[in-house]
Amino acid sequence: MMRAEVIRTNAFPALRVNGELQTALAFYTVPDSTPEARRATARRIAEFRDAGIHNYTFGLGLDAFMGQKAFWTGPGQYDGSVLDDLLGFVLSVDPAARILPRVAMDAPTWWKESHPDEV
């Protein structure tokens, strides 16, 4: 199992993974689902991979988000294919990827319509 921690050095915080200091630099984006945007994102991931940087963070919404399908589709209903697609996409370019998803916590449209007094 991987062990990762943020440590304090004299100059700056650093990332230690399995006892080895590594850069905390990460590729940070929200991948659009259009083919052109996917190709561009894959090229950037490959550049990070080739530079020996394997940290990635991506946005994921509970509702439709930046060209992605909704993850939370209804009461008790979730579409895990959204996350599977995102993780599979990154790992297809960099099998050594370490991924930290950023989840936008805005309520989905269906929830807002069902709970207008809560919005």
Image: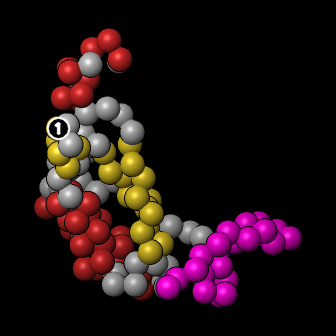
Quarter of the view holding residue 93: bottom left
- Asked if residue 54 lies left or right of residue 80, the reply is right
- Asked if residue 86 lies left or right of residue 55, the reply is left
Residue closest to the far front:
76
Which secondary structure, mark 1? strand
- Coordinates of residue 33 in the picture (x, y in percent): 18, 55
Q: Is residue 6 magenta?
A: yes
Residue closest to the far left:
35
Q: Is residue 25 above or below residue 61?
A: below
Q: Magenta region: which residues?
A: 1-21
Residue name at image x 22 percent, y 66 percent: 84
Count every numbered label the image shows and give the total.
1
- Coordinates of residue 74 in the picture (x, y in percent): 17, 38
Residue closest to the far right:
10
Q: Is residue 102 above or below residue 6?
A: above
Residue name at image x 20 percent, y 21 percent: 114
- Coordinates of residue 55 in the picture (x, y in percent): 48, 72
Callout 1, which amino acid?
A: Gly
Q: What's the colour scheme? A: secondary structure
Residue linked to disc 1 = 74
Residue name at image x 39 percent, y 39 percent: 105
Quadrant holding the C terminus: top left
Residue name at image x 56 percent, y 69 percent: 25
- Coordinates of residue 104 in the picture (x, y in percent): 38, 42
Q: Is residue 104 above or below residue 98?
A: above
